[in-house]
Image (cartoon, rainbow, N blue to C red):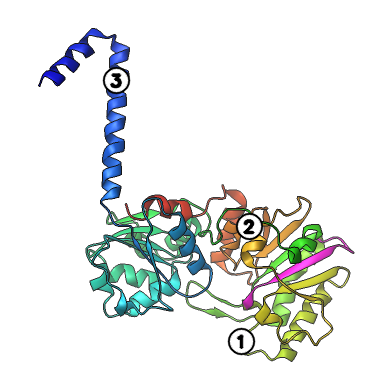
Amino acid sequence: MYIIRGDIIHIFEIRADDMYTTIRNTALAMVACFSYIAHASTHPPLIITRGAGGDASGATVIHDNWRHGTPDLVNLTDIPIDKIRPEKYSCVLIIGQGAIKEMLLANNASAILSGKTVGLYSHLIDQNTLRLLRQLQNKVRFNLFFTRSQITLLKLRNISEYNFLSSKVNNVWGQDSLAIETVAPDRGNIPEKALPLKTTDYVIWLGGNYTTSSGTQRIFTNDQIVVALKPLHNVISPNASIAIMLSPRFFDNSMSKEAKVKRLKAVLNTFSRNRVTFYMSKEMLANLKEFDLPVQLSPSYAELMRMPWASATRHFASVDQYNLFADLIPKVTPFLLEPNDADQALYATDYLNTRRVSLTQNILNHGCD
């Protein structure tokens, strides 16, 4: 009581502006204290993902950059859902379409997630995503992370699903334009094998077969790939060097090595007036060394994303590689393998016309709100 009384007397003796400053600083200190206590008493979340692609890499980035403790990270490719013990978690983050589909098929998904805060991310709003949201409706508190282009398309395609998604029971964080980042932002040393790429005039990041948000699998023929590359041929200078970075999806799993060679030669012929080198993974390169083709082992994806590319190098990328647009530092010119793909067309438009912000930071800030 004496301390409080003394403080009150002291406050009344100082000037009004000093009184305001004192109260403000005290309030800020109390807020910081309560915030610390709240986070200290909350167990870090469980992060669930699946596979070895961009979603899994993005989940690792979120795991490594979580600011209040270290989350547990489960990849459903390695650990079955029924082995998950959810009791100690008040928040679960589900990252990617693979994990969403696995949770939808699991018998114990409701038991794992009921009563918890669930942060859910997918670069496409597909039917599996909407089904899981409806299955868990009123059982969990959702924080949903979708790109602005996907939310816009859902509103145009299905207003009832859009109204369900944006209802008051869901927190939708959809103002960002890009998918999650899959590479940590630090800059390491450039590997020696990547040094020739620094002087390349043009880089083409070439994807391949993919599944659309409606569940349709797009399998491309050589002719379709050539047609998609023709506009690039028209703007690339003659005699310029081109590095073509091939996604594993560039080849169909059922293709023979002869069919793969034929596809590569079709692309080479498209850029016949240029000096072209293909870069690909060790697995893709394995059966192609015996052929007379300009093929090289690619540096890792992370090394390529971290590379300080020359300012004069111009980049093109097929839009089916959603994460690349969030990962690659230089500006990219997008192009479509499928000209009628509305998901990718609107994503590319957002990339070109809005501030380039990925959903990663929003997940870190609000995944467990």
Q: Residue at x 49, y 60 (%)?
A: 61
- Using the image, tell me which numbered label, if any, was put on residue 253: 1
Q: If the image is split into quadrants, where does the N terminus sit?
A: top left
Question: Which residues fall within the magenta stretch?
Answer: 236-248
Tell me the element at label 2.
loop
Separation of disc 3 and disc 1 at Cα? Answer: 68 Å
Amino acid bearing label 1: Asn
- Upstream in the sequence, badge 3 or badge 1? 3
Residue type at the position of mark 2: Leu
Residue at which label 2 appears: 328
Q: Which residue is mark 3?
A: 22
Q: Earlier in the sequence, mark 1 or mark 2?
A: 1
Compared with 58, 12 (above or below) is above
Toward the front, the furthest residue is: 2
Q: In x, y percent, where is residue 60?
A: 47, 63
The answer, for residue 46, to whether it is visible in the render is: yes
